[in-house]
Image: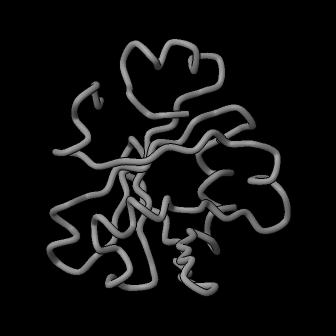
């Protein structure tokens, strides 16, 4: 499990799962600064999400730009990932970039799911900027 200060060695971003993530076509927006800092726009348009048990789910990655505004989202495949991992409204998903996979031109996120009932305790262990 990541601890405070691990961001450089284990880059990650987090998302609190709200109602819109469970509507018809959920998409998770990757923070633009994160995507740019780690060169994610140059990687393939599919990502692998690996849960804490090592199970893998392939999701589509879409990149777009409107004027000077870039955007990167994890899309098609998110519904299966959320359902399979019993993610509920209020849970927090922490997406840790697998740097070794990136070196092989692959986009893999190790995803930790912090259940809503435990979210109040995460501030003692994680620095996830909710």
Q: Can residue 127 be seen from the camera position used here?
A: yes
Q: How is the image coloured?
A: one colour
Residue 31: percent from the left, percent from the top?
Answer: 49, 59
Q: How many marks?
A: 0
The image shows residue 51 at horizontal and vertical percentages of 43, 48
Residue drawn at x 82%, y 45% as measured from the top left = 19
Indicate whether 46 appears above or below 51.
below
Rendered view: 22 above or below 56: above
Res 92 → quadrant: top right
Q: Is residue 24 left or right of residue 68?
A: right
| Residue ID at (28%, 25%) | 4
Is 103 positioned to the left or the right of 119 in the image? left
Can see residue 60? Answer: no
Identify the residue at image location x=68%, y=51%. Answer: 83
What x and y, as percent, mark residue 9?
A: 16, 45
User: Is 30 located above or below residue 4 in the figure?
Assistant: below
Residue 32 or residue 67, whichever sits in front: 67
Please state if 8 lies on the left or on the right of 34 as rendered. Answer: left
Identify which residue, 44 or 40, lies in the foreground: 40
User: For this rendering, which residue is in front, 117 or 42?
Assistant: 42
Q: If the image is split into quadrants, where does the C terminus sit? A: top right
Residue 79 falls in which quadrant of the image? bottom right
Residue 49 position, x and y percent, is 44, 60
Q: Which residue is drawn at 62% across and 71% down?
A: 75
The quarter of the rendered structure image containing the N terminus is: top left
């Amino acid at each position: 499990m990541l601890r405070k200060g691990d961001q450089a060695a284990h880059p990650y971003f987090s998302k609190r799962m709200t109602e819109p993530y469970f509507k018809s076509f959920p998409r998770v927006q990757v923070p633009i600064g994160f995507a740019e800092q780690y060169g994610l726009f140059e990687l393939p348009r599919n990502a692998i999400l690996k849960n804490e048990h090592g199970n893998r789910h392939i999701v589509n990655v879409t990149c777009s730009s409107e004027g000077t505004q870039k955007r990167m989202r994890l899309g098609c495949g998110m519904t299966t990932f959320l359902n399979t991992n019993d993610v509920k409204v209020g849970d927090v998903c922490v997406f840790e970039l697998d740097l070794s996979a990136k070196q092989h031109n692959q986009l893999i996120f190790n995803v930790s799911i912090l259940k809503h009932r435990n979210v109040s305790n995460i501030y003692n262990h994680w620095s996830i900027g909710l």
